Amino acid sequence: MADETRGPSAPGGSSGGTAAPASDRPTGDRPAGDRPSGDRPSFGDRPSGERPSGDRQFSGERRPPRPGGPGGGREGGRKFFRRKKVCKFCVEKIEAVNYKDVRLLAQFVAESGKIVPRRLTGVCTPHQRRLSSAIKQARNIALLPFAGRAA
Amino acid sequence: MNRTYELMFIVRPDMVEEEQDKLISTLSTVVTSSGGTVKSVEKMGKRRLAYVVRRFHDGLYMLLTVEGSGGLIAELERRLRVTEPVIKFLTVRIDEEQKRLDKLKAIKDARRKAPPAAAAAPAEPAAEAPAATA
């Protein structure tokens, strides 16, 4: 009984007459078979939300891959065992990232001269920040190339 | 307001030793005359440049560590700019980074001392707990 009293009040309060027929159609089509009529008002609450919610269910299924989405590769990493990347600076406890240390910096510069992104090297954010500024300083004083290999 | 800076500059590779020393001494006098101090001078030697600078493929790298004000650095940079054999220079302020490193080191040292204290601390509550129940 309590459910019934709640039921009519919810759609009436939310949107008046116009929304109710709109909600009737989808409810007639879809959930009638799935759920008892007592649940209808809850659908009436989000008539517009129904289709997106349908999409949401799909996306809900997709979601686990999605954090793996940049990890579409990562999911592959689960199949083929891939070592977890760790920040070199944290592991080896290198606190000072200096622009003069070309050997260290060169490890994080691609062949093209670009700074290798974190997602590839596994360097943590604070260290990547220091690293990138150090690389830029080294470029300025011709220790590292701006583009291409060091001549 | 004294700050520590690192002044790295590259001179053309065919510069003779005497002229290098002369350049360094003139820079040092500029520093001392405006109230700064030269902490260290290092000739890092000849190095291949990562890219061509003023048609040079090599350069002699020099490193000057200077303590002084910002105005002093401006003057030094002006001088480097007008000095013909200097092909590139870079000034980096290092005192704040040094401060950060010292702080980290202090924390690390404190932690090294802390473990015995931390080991003692859990033992005490464990001893107290039975006493409280009893």
Image (spheres, coloured by chain):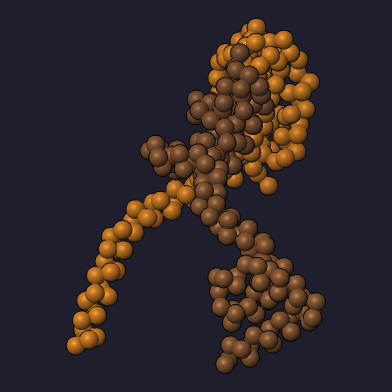
From where the camera sits, is residue B98 visible?
A: no
Displayed quadrant of residue A85:
top left
Displayed quadrant of residue A78:
top left
Return the residue nearer the eye: A45 or A125: A45
Taking B48 as reference, is A136 above or below it? below
Return the residue nearer the eye: B111 or B66: B111
Pinpoint residue A105: horizontal percent, then vertical percent. 53, 29
Judge left or right: residue A94 versus residue A139: left
- Which chain comes out orange in the rendered image? B
Determine the residue positioned at 78% across, 82% down. A16
Return the residue nearer the eye: A146 or A114: A114
- Which chain comes out brown in the rendered image? A
Pinpoint residue B81: horizontal percent, then vertical percent. 77, 23
Pinpoint residue A30: horizontal percent, then vertical percent. 62, 67
Pinpoint residue A126: horizontal percent, then vertical percent. 55, 46
Determine the residue positioned at 26% across, 66% down. B120
Determine the residue positioned at 21% across, 76% down. B127
Q: Quadrant of the C terminus of chain A?
A: top right
Determine the residue positioned at 31% across, 63% down. B118
Judge left or right: residue A17 versus residue A132: right
Taking B18 as reference, is B2 above or below it? below
Judge left or right: residue B127 versus residue B2: left
Q: Quadrant of the N terminus of chain A?
A: bottom right
Displayed quadrant of residue B89:
top right
